Amino acid sequence: MDNEIYLDGNATTAVLPAALRAALLAMEECYGNPSSTHATGLKAKAVLDAARARACRLLGVGPGRLMFNSGATEGIQTAVLSALCAVRARRLAGELAGTLLVYGATEHKAVPESLAHWNALLGLDLELVALPVGTDGRHDLAALRRLAPAAAFVCTMAANNETGVISDLTGIAAALEGSPALWMVDCVQALGKLPLDLAATRIDYAPFSGHKLYAPKGIGMLYVRAGAPFTPLMKGGGQETGWRSGTENMAGIAALGAVLAALEDGTLFASHAEQCMFRERLAAALRQALPGIVFNAPFDDALPTTLNFSVPGVSGKELLDLFDAAAVRVSAGSACSAAKAQPSYVLAAMGLPEWRSSNAVRLSFGPLMDDATVADACARIARCGGALRLAGMLGEPATTRPDGLLQLSDGGRHTWLVLDAASGTCAVIDPQPALAERIDALLRTHGFRVAARLSTRNGAGWPASGDSIELGRQSLRRVMIGAGTPCYLLGPAGERPRHAFIGDAAPSGLAGHVPPEALLCPAAEALSTLCAHPAPAGDIDLDAAGLAALLRQRPDAVLVDVREPHEHAVAVPFLGVPAASVPLSRLAGELPRWMAQAGQVPLVFYCRSGNRSARAAGCLRSLGYPQAYHVHGGVALA
Ligand code: PLP
């Protein structure tokens, strides 16, 4: 996307134009096999040798070895295999080898997973020990000193991918003094960002990935100290002097070589001081836009290119979606499943409170960052903050009130809020404890008075006197559908009800109690006739071409953005066409109006990825609205 600002550099980076050209050249002209002895092969070999020589100079490889491979995950496997084979050999020879596999508690998962895998495969039965870190994210060196005498292999990282926290490698080396342990330092996030002089250290293995610094995915490097034990992961044609067989990824190596050339040249990339200035400006914009924000790692000991933060009351997923709508790509600092964000294990290991580790957002950039992009990012961050403020999500009193029906869900259970903006009254149906804080904050910031909190399970909350609860223009009535089991009917005062809150009742048992045209709003997703049915098969999905054709044939088609209103507010209009903003949580309130159109007007739902819009279109189709569609893959693909 043209206006995209990519701030997820710790996940991966775009390819440097010079690297792209080098890769193309390697495929078009220098396509030889570097092992061939004819001129075409020699040309490829020259590219390979030049890239390696640059890497060796930049990383201070000295008498050590630097091999090319597919990336850090392979480098980590190779280092782990090499270290564990050496431990096995030492054990067999009756030498001191250690019994512990020590890894930093905040390591990338590739490290503990590889340790456990190879430990089991080789049948070594060594003990895996997570080395704790402090609240600053740095390793507990006192704990390491205690573990060091029994350590067989120690794995730490140069800089953390979630927080940017830089490890005290000198301190770790001192703690390992006298230990038999081999030492791997994952240098993935350090490449191009921290000075490295590997041969001057005690480090035995250091893996790197090219795609974290403007080279393509699939190319990496592994440093091995001179004299450190080595066991090849891959045997075959004997490339890389037998250390890593398989014909070399020449396009990747050429591209990485071009990035290393730019690093050596030193003029293209922002200096450390400039990177710190960029961080200051971004942090100031974030502080201004998101009151209450906390940064999850001290800036002093962290890469200036990584900002990890949490905002009270706003989840990482919500912030990620909002930033994404503003075409600012960041990542939730925690792994998100569709249902629930998993707290970040890195922040949890630092002992941060649960709300910070589950709300975390990581914003990271590379040394190609420039002034104009920072300025644009700051302006968009301000817009995002404004949208959250308007939505009442920043804990400040909101200036406008939502109106109508709002559906909130947790773990497959629904709570329904009936909101009347004009009178400032509302009713809460089936309030769930897990949502209590959120509901209270929403009602408080919008200044709603709760007229009733009703349960469909046992009828609790219904006023002792009166047949109905009046909420401005809307009226709630109660009908009993079983002994002690109520259902609540909602509609404009004096008219037939449009919505029925049926709790856990089966729709089949409602005849005679609920008008057939009323929309059923259940308490459980499993029962839902609303937004729960899988979309009926048919032409519900529109790809870019299908969407264009539909809009040509039916200029009256209505585009509906089902993202949250704050996402809609910061987004550039999709296809430049005005769209209605109806988030999934408000769909039930809008349905009666659409259904009254009897399917005459095509409705095209869209969202970020196509998940929410598929549910909305599926819901309308299952209710009998034939011309409901959704944009497959969302705005991300269309
Ligand atoms: N180590 C660190 C610190 C990382 O950030 C990553 C990638 O996110 C890896 C290892 C694995 O790198 P790759 O997926 O390129 O093999």
Image (cartoon, rainbow, N blue to C red):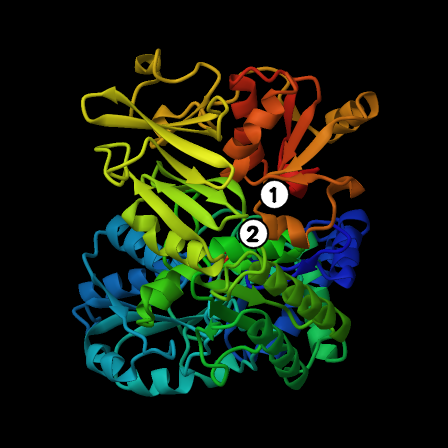
Instruction: State the image quarter where residue 637 is shown.
Output: top right
Q: Which residue is mark 2?
A: 321
Q: Is mark 1 within 8 Å of ligand 1?
A: no
Residue at horizontal 49 percent and vertical 69 percent from the top: 308
Give the left or right position of residue 521, taking residue 154 as reference. right
Residues at marks 2 and 1, CA–CA distance in whole angstroms? 8 Å
Where residue 516 sits in the image (x, y, percent)?
Answer: 44, 14
Q: Amino acid at mark 2?
A: Asp
Of 148 and 430, the residue lying toward us: 430
> Of callouts 2 and 1, which one flags the residue occurring earlier in the amino acid sequence?
2
Quadrant in the rendering for residue 544: top right
Q: Residue at x 73, y 65 (%)?
A: 258
Q: Which mark is residue 608?
A: 1
**Measured along the vertical axis of the image, is residue 526 above or below residue 227?**
above
Residue 298 in the figure: left or right of residue 558: left
Q: Position of residue 81 (x, y in %)?
A: 35, 58
**Local secondary structure at mark 2:** helix
Identity, as a three-letter code, of the amino acid under mark 1: Arg
What's the residue at 21%, 56% (across, down)? 124
Observer-nearest residue: 125 or 169?
169
Q: Quadrant of the C terminus?
A: top right
**Is 289 rendered above or below residue 270?**
above
Determine if residue 592 is in view: yes
